[in-house]
């Protein structure tokens, strides 16, 4: 699914999923064999395989929902 990563006014990383009209703050970031896993405030886990370092924000990336 396509998601937009951006920083909110407090400087925290947020994820916006347009198809679900969902905007949540990232509360945890972990590395996996396939890339990065972001855990959102609502409990969702999204896996990103091709995130550049450093992140260019705001930007739309492809993610896979794990839970």
Image (tube, rainbow, N blue to C red):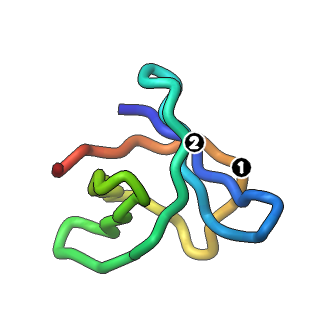
- State the residue at coordinates (29%, 68%): 35
Question: x, y (%) of residue 57?
Answer: 71, 56
- Residue visible at 17% across and 74% down in the picture: 33
> At 49% from the left edge and 39% from the top edge, which residue is drawn?
3
Residue marked by disc 2 = 4
| Few, some or many residues within 10 Å of mark 1 (<14, 14–19, 20+) | few
Q: Nearer the viewer, residue 66 or 2?
A: 66
Which label sits on residue 34? none
Q: Position of residue 17 (x, y in %)?
A: 48, 33
Q: Secondary structure at mark 1?
A: loop
Q: Which residue is mark 1?
A: 58
Cβ–Cβ below 8 Å for labels 1 and 2? yes
The percent coordinates of residue 23 (x first, y second) are 55, 41
Disc nearer the start of the sequence (1/2) = 2
Q: Is residue 46 left or right of residue 33?
A: right
- Image quadrant in which you'd find residue 43: bottom left
Could you tell whether 14 is left or right of 39 in the image? right
Pick out the residue farthest to the front.
42
The image shows residue 10, relative to residue 66, as above or below, that is below
Badge 2 local density, few (<14 within 10 Å), some, or many (20+)? Answer: some
Quadrant in which the N terminus appears: top left
Q: Residue furthest right?
A: 9
The span from disc 1 to disc 2 (Cα, nearest Å) is 7 Å
Q: Residue at x 35, y 45 (%)?
A: 63
Q: Residue furthest top?
A: 19
Quadrant of the image occupied by residue 10: bottom right
As displayed, is residue 20 above or below residue 57? above
- How many numbered dots are placed on residues in this image? 2
């Amino acid at each position: 699914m396509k998601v937009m990563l951006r920083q909110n006014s407090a400087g925290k990383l947020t994820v916006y999923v347009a198809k679900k009209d969902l905007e949540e703050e990232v509360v945890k970031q972990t590395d996996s064999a396939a890339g990065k896993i972001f855990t959102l405030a609502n409990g969702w886990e999204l896996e990103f395989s091709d995130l550049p370092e450093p992140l260019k924000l705001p930007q739309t990336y492809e993610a896979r929902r794990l839970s």
